[in-house]
Amino acid sequence: MKIIDAHVHIYPDKIAERASQGISDFYDMQVKYNGTVEKLLEICKRNNIVNCVACSVATAPEQVGIINDYMAESARTSNGFFVCLAALHPAMNELEIEAELNRAEALNLRGIKLHPDFQRFEIDNPAVFKIYERAEGRFPILFHTGDSRYNFSNPKRLANVLRAFPKLTAIGAHFGGWSEWQDCGSLAGFENLYVDTSSSLYELAPERASELIKMYGEERVLFGTDYPMWDADGELKFIEKLNLSERAKELIFYENTKRLYGL
């Protein structure tokens, strides 16, 4: 069965270890790998992963252009193995956002990555609507969603955005609410929402993960690892515990992500 990993982070080799350590420090969790592309490709090869949706987070506006250039180059030099997302930052003004989205289209970047907890903004703050207005009907947005330590990315806040922007395609990472899965019911029933499985299955009981897949719908769930945090070796073993049908696996592992990003 072909697999697409719908959520990985990649970095230039010279900063990969530092970036991975930053993730480890932020979450107070041990990151499994040093974040190099070489290691990711090794993991993908042994697990029949045919594409990775790759992203990186801009923690300041001046990082956006540099990240997007790297993402475009990664997609180009990998012959499309990496399906790359653009970085944006909420502190950018409307003209800067529009210009960068135009550039992202020209660079064949396929979506946008936002991380409210790293970037320190509330998902449903009207000050960020300038991004959603320009992305609606144009780019899907992969949101980090959920962190019980803060109140930036709670699933209820994402639900507010989905109601306000019904033509915006959103992907709620981590089943829509890392460490706040008890609030994921607020995301049920939105046709403009996908979720991914990343950084969740280590914590969720198989019965709870299965309930969430049923709630969102098998056609709206994407397999993701959150490399370098985790790897496909372990995440696929977690998936096997969920007793999914073969059709559900085809959708979650491959077809949903292929359809979403037009691969």
Image: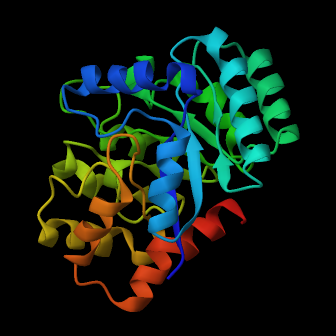
Q: Which quadrant of the figure contains the C terminus?
A: bottom right
Residue for point 73% across, 46% down: 75
Quadrant of res 213: bottom left
Residue 122 visible in the displayed image? no
The image shows residue 153 at horizontal and vertical percentages of 35, 33
The image shows residue 247 at horizontal and vertical percentages of 44, 89
Q: Is residue 62 above or below residue 118?
A: above
Residue furthest to the bottom in view is 246
In-front residue for pair 128/109: 109
> On the picture, is 184 further left or further right than 3?
left
Total labels drawn:
0
> On the picture, is 64 further left or further right than 203?
right
Residue for point 66% across, 51% down: 83
In-front residue for pair 12/109: 12
Residue 72 visible in the displayed image? yes
Q: Is residue 48 above or below residue 15?
A: below
Residue for point 26% across, 53% down: 184
The image shows residue 195 at horizontal and vertical percentages of 42, 57
The image shows residue 220 at horizontal and vertical percentages of 46, 68
Residue for point 32% across, 68% down: 236
> On the picture, is 60 further left or further right than 148?
right
Judging from the image, the colouring scheme is: rainbow
Residue furthest to the right in view is 106
